[in-house]
Image (tube, rainbow, N blue to C red):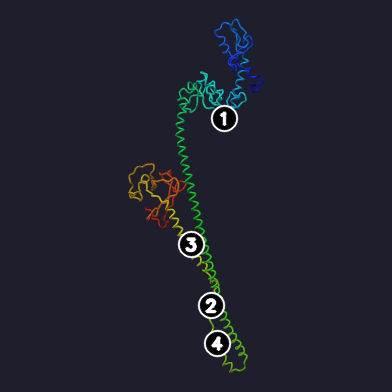
Amino acid sequence: MASPGHMLPAKQFLCTICQQVFTDPVTTPCGHNFCLACIQNVWDGIEVCQCPTCNKTFTSLPEISINTAFKELADTFRNITVCSSASQLCATKPGEVACDVCAATSLQVKALKSCLVCLTSYCEAHLEPHQGVATLKIHKLIEPVNNLQERMCKKHERLLEMFCRDEQKCVCQFCTETEHKDHHAVTIEDESGERKVQMKKTEADFQQMIQERLEKVEEIKSCLKLSNTSAEEEMKESDRLFTSLIRFIEERQIEANAEIKEKQKAAERRAEELVDQLQQEITELQRRNAELEELSDSEDYLHVLKRSPSLMSPPPTKEWMEIGVHPELCVGTVRGALSKLDDTLKNELDGLKKEEMKKMQKYAVDVVLDPDTAHPNIVLSADGKQAGRGELLHIVPDNPQRFDPVICVLGKRGFLSGRFYFQVAVGSKTFWDLGVVKESVNRKGMITSKPENGFWTDNFRPPLHLMPPFAP
């Protein structure tokens, strides 16, 4: 067969004795080529040397030497042949380490091992010498890696086989004898072993963290599902409530408008009655006025005297100064309707507050006060659920958790997240703060209760005019 990239036949590179590619080829005086070891084995211990190919006899042992040029050709042929066969078996894939020997012939064959002594990666075919030759079998082989030169000390050009724990870096043996001689150095195998132990622990921690987060994911999904259900129920309740309110408002609007119209009609009827009465009085007054004018022109003196008294006295009429139709008869009608609406809204709000309270009470927690945080002036009950201000300061350890001089006390149990509900009976106290704080809040010196300082509280302060006077 012809080798890739060469036109010479394969038999030109085969020793006729061992039928293998020449190893250290030599040429006899008759011009034939053999492996150095092969021809030496044939001629060893015989008196007359003969060429195994042409049978030419030599009276004395010929002087032979390795044919350097032909050796290079034979070695190249061997590598090409091995690489060609290896490439058919396992070509490299993206990200895999290639055999350095095959790469020299422009072939990309997957490496099986990397040698830390040769600083070379080998495929299965080129790894055979490391598995058969005694001097190569002692070399350190690892799984194939790239950039083997990075495993060499750049300063001393020796293998990085030690680890300096003081400077946390890989060094060579010569480094440990020079600039790192006073440092704590171990072999990279020992350090790697310890790191792997730490990695196992870290891996276990990571697994636990992963499991916790997976559980949290399921918890969040479950909460989201419950939230969706709750949101749907709230929307239904919202639709019911606002539909009811809208209907109630519309009914009150109809009632208010009807009442306004009825009042207006009553006003119109009243106005018509008053106008009729006024017209009657006007008619009567006009009649009398006409008679008076006629009587004034009369020459019948006796008739004037008899008739004038009755005409000169005014007819019976009403006192119209206090009588009329008020234009603002409907004042208060709308307010009355809104007052009814306000009562309904208050009832609905009270119902909602009760429902919300029931939901909040599901998150109720039992708060027990922590005596280690209590100011020396605070007296706690035996069960830790009541606190009062004592007359005298108690002698207590001045630990870092205790508030002083601000009179405060915290609960024993802390919360990282979630919802929590608790009630506090303040009794007749008129000066207090209640709420939650960060665990890291400052507990010594004067404290201002505000979110920037880690306090989220509600408080009560009496009006200034109710505060007791300061003692002189």
Measure the C-alpha gap from mark 4 to mark 1: 134 Å
Residue under the point 45% across and 29% down: 194
Mark 3 or mark 1, earlier in chain? 1
Say the numbered circle drawn on residue 396.
Answer: none
Q: Position of residue 381 (x, y in %)?
A: 33, 50
Measure the C-alpha gap from mark 2 to mark 4: 23 Å
Residue occupied by mark 2: 323
Measure the C-alpha gap from mark 4 to mark 3: 64 Å
Q: Residues within 10 Å of mark 1 (few under 14, many from 20)?
A: some
Tag 2: residue type? Answer: Ile
Q: Position of residue 428 (x, y in %)?
A: 37, 56
Tag 3: residue type? Answer: Leu
Mark 4 or mark 3, earlier in chain? 4
Say the numbered circle drawn on residue 345.
Answer: 3
Residue occupied by mark 4: 313
Residue occupied by mark 1: 96
Mark toward the viewer: 3 or 2: 3
Measure the C-alpha gap from mark 3 to mark 2: 41 Å
Mark 2 or mark 4, earlier in chain? 4
